[in-house]
Image (cartoon, rainbow, N blue to C red):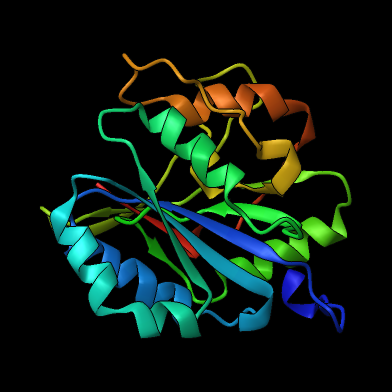
Amino acid sequence: KYKKVKLPDNPPFVSALCLTRNRVNFLEKAIKQFINHTYPSKSRELVLMYDEDDDNTIMFINQNKDIFDLNNINSFICKKDISIGEKRNLSTQNVKPYSDFSIIWDDDDIYHEERIELMTKAIISNPGKAIELRQVIINDEDRGALYLSPPQDDDGGIIYHYPGTTIINSNLLKNKYSTDRGKSFGEDTDARDKYIDYIITINIPNLYKYRF
């Protein structure tokens, strides 16, 4: 139904937040997906965070500065050896000051070209909310197979949720991630717990393919 929603003449500004480390092959694909999105280019940015000792990524960025400048891709250096949560918080701090919404753009996943557009239409149709996908596509590259993930279950069963798919008010997301340096995963679930009362889910699983 969100395909029928009309974006305003001056669409909300959306910041896509991307962390990367030493996997230029994935990063290049993530950037191409961002560039090829249907959402108006003047109303979006890619905020790219990389480590100060990540020589391969630094070389890639230096070689592609023109592409970055033309497509509103902004890169920022992180100190090495900080937690994923700390890096995510830095990305939330480095969005444009006029950013309306933020969306996670992990470098190793696959995004439908309408992901930003449809999720932005969903969030402007539900003011004051955060929009999360109820299901995603699991891309099992080892088996060469695609699976539909389990849905979120509100009836007392196992609760699956997909915080990496969320679009949310940029100010609401700022500095919500755990800074526990011993945490190598799960920082997005910690953040989700802090804005859980705002979440509503939509079921368009093909917008997000999770590499497994």
Q: Quadrant of residue 183?
A: top left
- Residue nearer the viewer, 45 or 114: 45
Q: Is residue 209 above or below residue 199?
A: below
Instruction: Locate residue 160, reporting x and y percent.
Output: 50, 30
Q: Is residue 79 left or right of residue 189?
A: left
Q: Quarter-wise, where is residue 119 in the image?
A: bottom right
Residue 1 appears in the rendering: no
* Percent coordinates x, y for residue 79 in the rendering: 32, 36
Quadrant containing the N terminus in the rendered view: bottom right
**Who is closer to the viewer here, 119 or 74?**
74
Residue at 75%, 70% in the rendered image: 2
Q: How many marks?
A: 0
Left or right for 82, reference 176: left
Q: Quick check: can you spot residue 95?
A: yes
Q: Residue at (53%, 49%) from the top-left corner? A: 165
**Which residue occupies the foreground of this view, 107 or 47?**
47
Where is residue 90? Give x, y as percent: 51, 39
Residue located at (58% from left, 27% from top): 191
